Amino acid sequence: MAFRPDVPRRAFRIVGTMYPPFDGSGTHRWGSRWISPGRWVVHAAESYALAVLENLVHWQANSLPPGQMCVPVEAPDDLPFESVAASDVELWPPTNDSQTRALGDDWYERRETGVLCVPSVVSAFDRNVLFNQRHPDFSRLVVQDSIPANIDARLLQYRQ
């Protein structure tokens, strides 16, 4: 893992209105590709477009469930980040979560930074952003008001 100065200072999270807008309880309960269960990590994407794609893949659907909101978050310029590149993972895209979880869990446990950028499997050119909810820097994030998360209806015409 490397510290990178070019990490985006804005990220986007899409979440249902029945959940807290910027909370890692889902990851704590189920884990993710990058984090084992039992850790408080909020997942977001470096762009709204990637957040939509990641959610479509997660829901295995051609549309988002009703009531989804986009939560933009901004990080101060001096907030340190870490980054994982696809080349840091032995097999990319991964066929299981063991190596990616080991990298993410190590970042979480070391607590050197509160933000980790990771490659997206959905888009080879974009990254997801993980926020350690238990890191002191978490309180420095500026979570903006939620806005409805809508997707263009043209995306829905490509059903298989």
Image: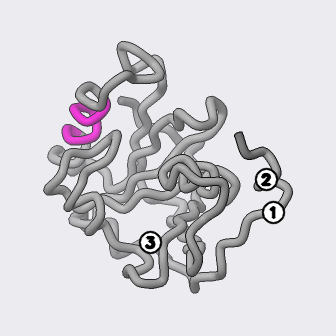
Residue 136 position within the rendered picture, expressed as x and y whole percent measured from the top left: 25, 67
The structure residue drawn at horizontal position 78% and vertical position 45%, both measured from the top left corner, is: 158
* The residue stretch that appears in magenta: 100-106
Please give the name of the residue rendered at 66% of the width and 54% of the height, measured from the top-left corner. 62
Q: Is residue 21 magenta?
A: no
Q: Which residue is mark 3?
A: 141
Q: Residue 128, how many percent across, how many down? A: 51, 47
Tell whether label 1 touches label 2 (CB within 8 Å): yes
Amino acid type of the residue tagged 3 in the rendering:
Leu
Q: Amino acid at mark 2?
A: Leu
Distance (Cα) linking label 3 and label 2: 32 Å
Q: Is residue 91 left or right of residue 52?
A: left
Q: Is residue 103 magenta?
A: yes
Q: CA distance from mark 1 to mark 3?
A: 29 Å
Q: Residue furthest front?
A: 160
- The colour scheme used here is one colour
Mark before the other along the chain sequence, 3 or 2 = 3
* Mark 2: secondary structure: helix
From the image, tell me which residue sits under label 2. Answer: 155
Residue 152 - label: 1
Numbered label attached to residue 127: none
Q: Position of residue 35 (x, y in %)?
A: 26, 45
> Residue shown at 45%/39% (left/top)?
118
